[in-house]
Amino acid sequence: MLIDNPVTLIAACSASAAAINLAVLKVSPGISDRMRHTLSGAGPVVAALGVMIAPHDSVVANGTDLAVLAASLVGGVAAAIGATKFVRPDRALTGA
């Protein structure tokens, strides 16, 4: 099994996706919501997968690994959408 602690991975990807979404919204508000949510939700999952695969020559991803990665992706997109629903974008990174 490639992923040792799935709960930590899902939580970290969700938190990272929310933070990335708010940062992109603050820096570049012209990006459409759908693209921003998708990219900020998928980015942490891809990065985590890259970190797990990099030290190995060959990797076998079981069904459980793929299910955890899918849950991380869905959780990341949901966190990105929720971040803009519940945090006002004008106050996202300033703390005001």
Image: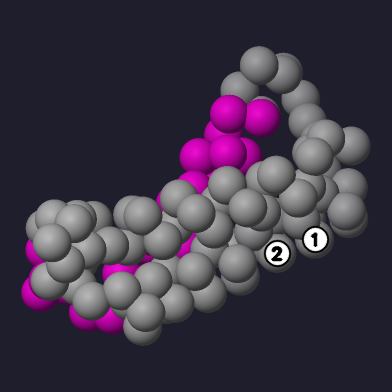
Density class for disc 1 (Cα within 10 Å; few <14, some 14-19, many ≥20) is: few
Q: Is residue 83 above or below residue 6?
A: below
Tell me the residue that label 2 is attached to.
71
Give the Cα distance between marks 1 and 2: 6 Å
As for residue 91 lying within the magenta part, the answer is no
What predominant SS class does the magenta segment belong to? helix
Please name the residue that numbered disc 1 is placed on: 67
Q: Are marks 1 and 2 in contact (CB under 8 Å)?
A: yes
Q: x, y percentage for residue 33?
A: 28, 80
Q: What is the span of residues highlighted in magenta in the rendered image?
A: 28-52
> Residue flagged by tag 2: what amino acid is it?
Ala
Q: How many marks?
A: 2
Report helix, strand or loop for mark 1: helix
The type of residue carrying mark 1 is: Ala
Residue for point 19% across, 73% down = 89
Residue at 70% across / 44% down in the picture? 8
In this rendered view, identify the residue nearer to me: 82 or 43: 82
Task: Indicate whether residue 38 is drawn in magenta.
Answer: yes
Q: Quadrant of the N terminus?
A: top right
